[in-house]
Each structure stands twice: as structure tokens, then as C-alpha cells.
């Protein structure tokens, strides 16, 4: 029988710590009791919204919904009222789960509220049946919806990606294979719990393995070092977090020792700059593994735990995931079959859109049949909108988004990501973003936004252009350079290129 959380059913790890947030924790037996009791209250509820603060209550609420076979809609507590109103109107939840004492904004006022109880309780039998279809996390239909996760809405109002239960299981099992992830692992992270990275991979991942997760609540280098020194084996983060760790390493040998003792350091949600890779590896002897995923696809590729870390690449497709790079006219450049068989030639230069297929994909955009149809090709591949090349060793190297990062200049197709990485190698550059702007002669010109290491003595535009031309090619050099105090980013650390100031 299909089961998302076999560890909650079997009882073999009943006394093991499942979740810890600060000084509050639940064993597997206590989680089964708390989530199981809540699951019985959700019988027939339809979709349920979850006020996804970084707390024990959020984790219990989502697990309870999954035990009940009820789709959970995680809500970003930082969402504005207009965005929140759109999500609630679109997903139509029947109630909202929140921690006792949380103050909810106006748009949630009309919904029935259930306060999640995550207090330590006496364990009760886990195999409580809910709705006649759910027994301890098992469900007869793997394609039943597990979550509705809303996209960032960079091209319009957020769309609700319906994530089926089989996609959650397939992704987490594929990551277990790639990362040699077992129930003995203890994960530490401080990621938000309203999105795929922090919630599905960072909370449901350890629970599916029968392992433990320690959530920092709020990310800090001190918290990371403390948990790694106290037995945590894995760290998940986004580039902003790893940048802060890299900045701290020079003055904190204790942090270097803690990171060096981790079994696995994983970065995702955006590309980790080369200079942060190098600083962390030099100080700790430990490389940072990068992976690639999306809301609609969960995880697609990763550097393997037993593979070689190559900064700038996101590894190879996970087991069961087919991947191909496609020209604008639909011609396939190269890729992988779902069984890992390579197709085409990997030249490290040909840029194409990444398309994927496999059990990790979402079912649909809620209430958006036209958008769902447009997201897929006629032969069933999902169009990611991300541009990449396949290096000669088979690694996927992402060069940017098709909409914002593919620059067509002077007859060349240029990926913004490789220019950003080149700029970040310059000793005077702290942060960099690259995009194209209209140019009467070239079609588009390459423009760079730079946060200098020393604002009083920034590198010159000519110096940066020459730096890129030497490392990549002359046609990839920035034609304009603009200096900023900081780059606009979202909650996951991704640069918001549409918010970059234009002249």
C-alpha cells in the first residue's frame, strides 16, 4: 500500500526525535499522536490553508492534512493582503490551520480556524482511519493531491501548482538515492515552510526517511554551527545563507570545523556563486552540492553525494526523471532518458530550454486549464523556461531563465548566468546581476548591475567588461554597468530582475 510516512505507521522509530524547532520537539510517537488527532478533525474538510510560520505547528498541520488525505495550501505569512486574497479565492480552502495565538490578517477572517496543538502527548495508535481511504499516511490513489503550492507570480498572479502524493514520494526517494539519505541523518535548516524547498524537501523529506529535522526558526551561522556540532549531518540552504556562512568563516574557525564535519551541504533555489563555493571549500574541505527544481516539478537534478562537486553545475537528472534541452524550433539538442541513458552530444556550448518529464511533476495549475496545457509540449514534456547547456561530462549547467536571462545579442544566444559567475570572480564584486536591454545595433545588449565589495572604490565598467571578455568571449562582455547598494531579492534569495532599475 502507498504510504508517504512509513515511519509513522511502523513504530520502529517511535522514540526517535522527528521534529525540533528551538527548544520544542516531538518524537515520532508524539508526532503521530498530535497529527493523528488533528487528522480526524479534518475529515471531509476539502482543501485546508496552513498559516506557514517556521514553527512546529506548521509541520504538524501539514502532516495531519496529508494523513487525512486533505490537500494543504501553505500560506506565506509575508504575503500582502491582495496576494493572500487571490490565493484564498483561487484555492477556496474550507478552513485554516494556525498556531494558537497567531494573529491572522483580514482575508483569513471569514474562514473557520483550527488551532494546531503540537504539545507533547501520550502516544496513541497511529493506524487511525480517516475518510476510509487513509491509514497512517497510506492512500489508495498516489495521484491524489497532497499540496497546492503557489508560484512566485513573476509573470502575473500566483498560480496554484497541484502537487500529487506520488510526486512527493518520487522526489524524496530519488533524493535519498542521490544523497545516500537515510533515517540516521539529522537535517538542519532555517528555510521558510510555505514552499517546496523548506517544506517538502526540508520537513517531509526527513519524515519519509524516518530521520530527524532541526529547524533553526531564523537562520544564523551560530545556529548552524551549534546544530552541526550537536550531531546534525546535513545542511540545506539557499545562496544567501551560504554567502553569509562564507563571510563568517574567515573569523570563525569553529564554524569551519562544524561545516567540515557535515556529511552533506546542499544549496538550492538559485545558483550558488563560484566565489562562495571556493571560500567554503577552502575553509572546510567540504564542497556544496547543488540541485535544481521548481514548484511544478519538485526536484529534477542534483550532484550526487558520491559524485564530484563542480561549481556552476546542478548534476545529472534524478532517477526516473527524463530531461532534454530544446531549441526554439523544438529541435532536441541533447538530454537523458528517464533511465539515465544519454541522448545527443554534450558540447558544453549549445544553449536550450530544459524540458522534463517523470513522476515528480505536478498535476495541473488549479483552475487554469489553459495555463496547464501551455506548460506541456504535445509529446508530454514540461517546459521549465530555464535555459542550460550540457557539459561534456554530462552535468547540467543552468545559464538563466528564458524570459529574463536569455540574451540575443549580435546573432549570439547568451546566458546571463555564466556572465554573472564570471563577474563574481572579480575581486571587487560582491554581487552581480545580468540581463539584456534593447539595442538598435545588436538587438539586445548585455547589461550588468553590480554591488561592489568597496563602494568607495568600485571597479570600472571597462575593467569588468575586459574581465568577462577574457574569461568567456568578447561578445559576452557587459556593454553597460550600473552600480547598486544591494540587489532586489525574494524570500528564497532569488534576484528579482524585473525590479532592477533601468535607465
Image: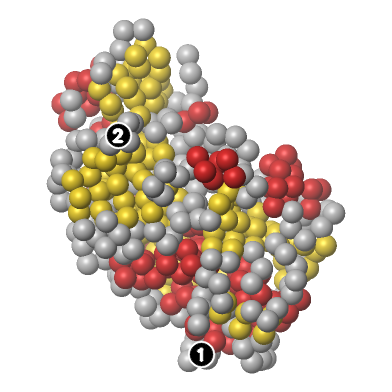
Q: Position of residue 469 (x, y in %)?
A: 19, 24
Q: Are marks 2 and 1 in contact (CB under 8 Å)?
A: no
- Can you see residue 281? no
Above or below for 325 versus 356:
above
- For disc 2, the neighbor class at 10 Å (few under 14, some 14 to 19, many from 20) is some
- For disc 1, the neighbor class at 10 Å (few under 14, some 14 to 19, many from 20) is few
**For residue 188, side relative to residue 434 (left or right):** right
Q: Please report the residue visible at 64 percent of the width from the left and 72 percent of the height from the top.
A: 69
**Viewer-nearest residue: 371 or 493:** 371
Above or below for 495 versus 7:
above
**Viewer-nearest residue: 76 or 88:** 88
**Viewer-nearest residue: 147 or 55:** 147
Q: Please report the residue visible at 62 percent of the width from the left and 50 percent of the height from the top.
A: 366
Above or below for 115 versus 451:
below
Q: Position of residue 40 (x, y in %)?
A: 73, 79
- Residue designated by label 2: 327
Q: Please report the residue visible at 54 percent of the width from the left and 63 percent of the height from the top.
A: 164
- Residue designated by label 1: 10
- Can you see residue 350? yes
The residues bearing labels 2 and 1 have C-alpha atoms spaced at a distance of 49 Å
Determine the image quadrant of residue 56: bottom right
Q: How is the image coloured?
A: secondary structure
Q: Please report the residue visible at 37 percent of the width from the left and 11 percent of the height from the top.
A: 439
**For residue 267, side relative to residue 465 (left or right):** right
Q: Position of residue 151 (x, y in %)?
A: 56, 46
Tell me the SS state at disc 1: helix
Which of pointers 2 and 1 indicates the residue nearer the eye?
A: 2
Above or below for 289 versus 388:
below
**Residue at the far front in the pictured view:** 378
Amino acid at each position: 500500500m502507498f504510504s508517504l510516512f512509513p515511519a509513522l505507521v511502523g513504530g520502529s522509530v517511535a522514540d526517535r526525535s522527528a521534529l525540533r524547532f528551538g527548544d520544542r520537539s516531538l518524537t515520532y510517537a508524539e508526532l503521530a499522536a498530535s497529527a493523528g488527532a488533528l487528522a480526524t478533525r479534518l475529515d471531509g474538510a476539502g482543501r485546508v490553508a496552513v498559516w506557514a510560520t517556521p514553527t512546529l505547528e506548521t509541520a504538524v498541520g501539514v502532516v495531519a492534512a496529508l494523513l487525512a488525505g486533505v490537500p494543504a495550501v501553505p500560506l506565506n505569512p509575508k504575503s500582502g493582503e491582495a496576494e493572500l486574497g487571490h490565493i484564498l479565492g483561487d484555492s477556496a480552502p474550507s478552513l485554516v490551520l494556525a498556531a494558537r495565538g497567531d494573529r491572522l490578517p483580514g482575508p483569513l477572517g471569514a474562514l473557520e480556524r483550527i488551532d494546531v496543538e503540537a504539545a507533547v502527548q501520550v502516544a496513541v495508535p497511529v493506524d487511525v482511519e480517516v475518510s476510509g481511504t487513509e491509514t497512517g499516511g497510506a492512500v489508495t490513489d498516489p495521484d491524489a493531491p497532497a499540496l497546492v503550492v503557489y508560484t512566485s507570480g513573476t509573470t502575473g498572479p500566483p498560480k496554484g501548482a497541484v502537487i500529487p502524493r506520488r510526486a512527493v514520494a518520487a522526489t524524496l526517494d530519488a533524493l535519498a538515492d542521490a544523497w545516500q539519505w537515510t533515517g540516521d541523518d539529522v537535517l538542519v535548516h532555517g528555510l521558510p515552510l510555505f514552499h517546496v524547498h523548506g517544506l517538502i524537501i526540508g520537513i517531509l523529506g526527513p519524515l519519509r526517511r524516518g530521520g530527524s529535522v532541526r529547524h533553526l526558526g531564523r537562520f544564523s551561522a551560530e545556529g548552524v554551527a551549534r546544530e552541526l556540532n550537536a550531531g546534525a549531518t546535513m545542511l540545506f540552504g539557499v545562496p544567501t545563507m551560504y554567502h553569509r556562512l562564507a563571510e563568517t568563516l574567515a573569523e570563525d574557525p569553529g564554524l569551519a570545523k562544524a561545516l567540515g564535519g557535515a556529511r552533506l551541504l546542499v544549496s538550492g533555489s538559485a545558483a550558488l556563486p563560484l566565489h562562495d563555493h571556493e571560500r567554503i571549500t577552502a575553509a572546510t574541505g567540504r564542497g556544496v552540492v547543488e540541485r535544481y527544481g521548481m514548484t511544478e516539478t519538485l526536484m529534477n537534478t542534483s550532484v550526487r553525494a558520491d559524485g564530484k562537486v563542480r561549481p556552476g553545475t546542478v548534476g545529472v537528472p534524478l532517477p526516473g526523471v527524463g530531461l532534454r534541452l530544446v531549441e526554439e524550433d523544438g529541435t532536441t539538442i541533447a538530454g537523458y532518458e528517464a533511465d539515465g541513458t544519454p541522448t545527443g552530444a554534450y558540447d558544453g556550448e549549445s544553449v536550450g530550454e530544459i524540458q522534463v518529464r517523470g513522476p515528480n511533476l505536478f498535476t495541473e495549475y488549479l483552475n487554469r486549464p489553459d495555463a496547464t496545457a501551455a506548460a506541456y509540449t504535445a509529446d508530454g514534456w514540461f517546459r521549465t523556461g530555464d535555459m542550460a547547456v550540457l557539459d561534456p561530462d554530462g552535468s547540467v549547467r543552468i545559464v538563466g531563465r528564458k524570459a529574463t536571462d536569455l540574451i540575443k545579442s549580435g546573432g549570439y544566444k547568451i546566458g546571463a548566468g555564466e556572465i554573472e559567475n564570471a563577474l563574481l570572480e572579480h575581486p571587487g564584486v560582491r554581487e552581480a546581476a545580468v540581463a539584456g536591454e534593447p539595442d538598435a545595433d545588436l538587438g539586445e545588449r548585455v547589461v550588468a548591475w553590480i554591488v561592489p565589495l568597496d563602494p568607495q572604490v568600485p571597479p570600472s565598467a571597462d575593467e569588468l567588461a575586459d574581465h568577462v571578455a577574457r574569461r568567456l568571449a568578447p561578445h559576452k562582455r557587459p556593454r553597460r554597468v550600473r552600480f547598486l547598494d544591494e540587489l532586489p531579492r525574494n524570500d528564497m534569495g532569488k534576484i528579482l530582475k524585473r525590479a532592477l532599475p533601468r535607465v
